[in-house]
Image (spheres, coloured by chain):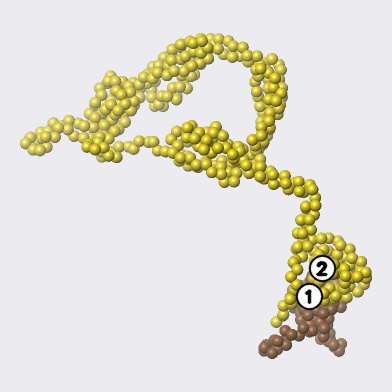
Chain colours: A brown, B yellow
Amino acid sequence: MSIKDELLFDFSIRMPRLLIGGKTGILDNVKKIVLISENNIVVDHGKRYSSVNGSGLCVKLIEEERIIITGEIYSVEFYGDRGDIHEE
Amino acid sequence: MIGVISMKNRGSFLEHSIEIKVEGFDRQKLLTECTQRGIIIKDIRSVSEIETIITLMEWDYEQFQRIAKNKYKITILKEYGYKPLIRKTFNKKSTIIGLLLFALILFYQSTFVSEIQILGYRSYTEAEIRDALRDAGLYEGCSKSVDLEEVKLHIYKELDNIAWIGVRYMGNLAEVTIAEGTITPKPVDKSKPSHIVAKKEGYVERTIAREGMIAAEPGTYVKPGDILISGIVPVTSTAYGTSAAEMTERYVHASGEVYAKVPYRLFCYQEKYKYIKSPTGNYIYGLRFELGDLKFNTAKEYYKYSNSTYMEKEILKIIRPIPFTLGLVRVEEVEVSKKQKSKDELQKEANRLARNIIAEKVPQNAQILNKSLKFSPRENIIGVNIMLETLEEIGEKKEIYIGNTTD
């Protein structure tokens, strides 16, 4: 990754930034919590939304612009401004 | 690359946190607002559509209430952290009293000796040293305020051949280090000339000289230091006309055994009367407590007899955490009457005394040839005069020094 790309990535504070590993997920740049349930957690990052789907999901910590979640994570979805869906 | 989000440093959940139940609709909005205001929330559990349990730090609670306004019902469920724990602990008087008592016991038990370790002994047994230390006032359960200099002096007096003694405390352990002196005479080197001299007085009975010349004939009375077998042997030289002809004696390393009759005169006393204690049938029971230096005996407090016998059965004795002894005591009143001892009893007692005194004064390898007991009655006591004649080996080697004496 070039320096330009890296800087752009670091300063994209209104874009989703997620780290998922094992049964833990860290969601950064959280501006708003949209939904919290056992199967789905949806957050607004400012420009886009991200949704974590799974079972037995639990929010372990909410701090400044960061949410740490635990549970069985099955999939992550990103919702764009215009309502288009991109799944990874 | 994930950027690190800066966090306000306001302590941790370990310090003081509260678990609260929030009841109301649209909880996501409330949580979002908390995030925006920098309130850290953890362990969010959704109980139902309208009930959520969350944990936050105590100092954020006021701000949380302001955000929630009156739209939500908030109930505090639990408090966590060391701050509420300390507050709760010190709010209870019984805990404070318990802690003070614990500290007091801890301090009190540190003023006693709970174990004695003895190091460095060789010829003495550990039990002998322990007994001597007990007599001096140092025993397991005694106070640490015992004068160690007095203890040392007592040990020096009681045990022979102690070159050095050190006592030091390590917590409740008293470490006693002993260095025994060496009083064994240095054996004479076999290559050096020596005499056999008398180490005590006596009449020479027989001499077995292996090397050297007999100096004391049988029947001779010798005193300590007298030569028994001489290491200087006369020479009759036949080397006429040479310098060797002038030599009239030669030096040898004398060896052999010299047995002598050694007389002993020992004296001891015994009671003329024996005392008979007859119980009157009156007795009292009591308890004896000993807590460290504090001693109390109920039987002694209510004691009213002029003559009595004292019996005690130890019920409990502990050293840790604090020395404590509990004993059941029985004090029985007795009438004392005296009766003159019979001749048989006197003889038996005198023989017992004589055996003890002989075991103490006469060497173990001595053979007793004659023994006589002579009684000399006085007003209340009888003196026992013990005359002994033993056969003992009395010779010891002594180096012959030529010219100036050097070691």
Q: Quadrant of residue A6?
A: bottom right
Q: On the rendered image, what quadrant is the N terminus of chain A found in? A: bottom right
The correct choice, above or below, for A15 with respect to B374 in the image is below
Residue occupying the point 23% across, 35% down: B252
- Pick the front one: B91 or B14: B91
Q: Disc 2 on helix, strand or loop?
A: helix
Look at discs 2 and 1 and give the one toward the viewer.
2
Q: Are the residues flagged by discs 2 and 1 from a single subunit?
A: no
Residue B278, given in percent of the width and then of the height, sits at 65, 14
- What residue is disc 1 on? A64
- Chain letter belonging to callout 2: B
- Numbered disc total: 2
The correct choice, above or below, for B286 with respect to B126 in the image is above
- Chain letter belonging to callout 1: A
Q: Disc 1 on helix, strand or loop?
A: loop
The correct choice, above or below, for B52 with respect to A8 in the image is above
Label annotation for residue B292: none
Residue B32, given in percent of the width and then of the height, sits at 85, 76
Asked if residue B328 can be seen in this view, the reply is no
Residue occupying the point 52% across, 35% down: B150
Q: On the rendered image, what quadrant is the C terminus of chain A found in? A: bottom right
Q: Is residue B156 left or right of residue B17?
A: left
The amino acid marked with disc number 2 is Asp
Q: Quadrant of residue A57?
A: bottom right
Residue B51, given in percent of the width and then of the height, sits at 90, 68
- What residue is disc 2 on? B60
The amino acid marked with disc number 1 is Glu
Asked if residue B407 can be seen in this view, the reply is yes
Discs 2, 1 touching: Cβ within 8 Å = no
